[in-house]
Amino acid sequence: MNTDPWLSVAAATVEDRGDEKGDLFHVKHQDDAATATTFDDTPLAREIADLNARRRALEGVTPPLPRQTRVITVSNQKGGVGKTTTTVNLAAAFAAAGARVLVIDLDPQGNASTALGVPHTADTPSVYDVLIDEFPLADIIQTSPESPNLQCAPSTIHLAGAEIELVSQVAREHRLRHALRDYLRDAAERPHVVLIDCPPSLGLLTINAFTAAEEVLIPIQCEYYALEGLSQLLGSVQMIQKHLNPAIRVSTIMLTMYDGRTRLAQQVADEVRGHFGDQVLGTVIPRSVRVSEAPSFGQTVIAYDPGSAGAVAYREAAVEMLTRGTTSPVTPADGKEN
């Protein structure tokens, strides 16, 4: 058995990168100093050194927390771009940075609730009850086992029928907004950040999310057809601005599923940055086996493997978003401070 701890770290890092050749990665332990020196100069060794440096840098960072609750809708009408993954891992990263975070799961599949370890069986009070039966939001919120700072308003299968039931409701586009407003007004400790996970479609659930939020975060995968449907999403945001919520804006675009070894990923990143400029985060989220594995254990990658490349990237993205979004202190409109 190979007992060299450095080589064990190297093997784990190859697996975390999602390298298809990871299973073929075998290194024979040798005491030859020259061989070790050569190995230290490999791209893999440099990648490990860079990851360790980023971990150390995060340990010394205390990002500013917003004085007014930031309500952010995470949306992309194209499926498979890492929308829910981004929502839950950003939420956990915000919580790890000291922020109080509420995740509102508006996707009937309930994947965000699963990843946060929150029960969401059919008989669980959920966002459906808030939207249809006007339950107070505070009555359905659960605390994630990951952190006392991380809470979730879960989704259940009943939410799948909410699109139809909302059609006949009064103020159908504003029901989540009103519920969230009442919750923030009465909460003893208001969350610093609210993240709303949307279904991958433009229906009444997504419109409720847009109407309730002030910011939109768009995850974009660094793959072919990455920008497909994006113009439609931006048009939807403009429609919401004009008719329902003038305050909403696209504040953040996050590049996900990035593989720096491929020219395509680099080209997509360059194209997105060239088109959207400062709206694009400097941090990119890499493809990572650990990120994909974490939900099957009912965890975010921050809890599942906090030292992995994916976890470090989400923590860096959270710090960048908190730093970008916090300007001079702001007092909420109702006079309450966090």
Image (tube, rainbow, N blue to C red):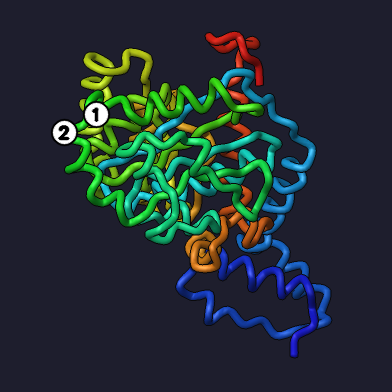
Badge 1 is on which residue?
Answer: 172
Which residue occupies 25% across, 24% down?
171
Which residue occupies 61% across, 14% down?
327
Q: Quadrant of the C terminus?
A: top right
Which residue occupies 72% across, 74% down?
7
Q: Is residue 1 left or right of residue 195?
A: right
Q: Quadrant of the N terminus?
A: bottom right
299, 8: nearer the viewer: 299
User: Tag 1: residue type?
Assistant: Arg
The picture places residue 36, in percent across and down from the top left corner, at 77, 72
Q: Is residue 258 visible?
A: no
Query: Residue furthest toward the bottom?
Result: 1
Instruction: Give the class, few, some or many, for how many residues have Cα within 10 Å of label 2's Cα (few <14, many ≥20).
Output: few
Query: Tags 2 and 1 in contact by the CB under 8 Å rule?
Result: yes
The picture places residue 11, in percent across and down from the top left corner, at 64, 73
Q: Is residue 60 visible?
A: yes
Secondary structure at badge 1 equals loop
The picture places residue 195, in percent across and down from the top left corner, at 48, 36
The picture places residue 176, in percent across and down from the top left corner, at 37, 31
The label on residue 185 is none
317, 5: nearer the viewer: 317
User: Tag 2: residue type?
Assistant: Ser
User: In 3D space, how far apart are the residues under numbered discs 2 and 1 (Cα atoms)?
Assistant: 8 Å
- 327 is higher (above) or lower (below) than 55: above
* Displayed quadrant of residue 20: bottom left
Badge 2 is on which residue?
Answer: 168
- 251 is higher (above) or lower (below) than 134: above
Instruction: Give the class, few, some or many, for how many residues have Cα within 10 Å of label 1's Cα (few <14, many ≥20).
Output: some
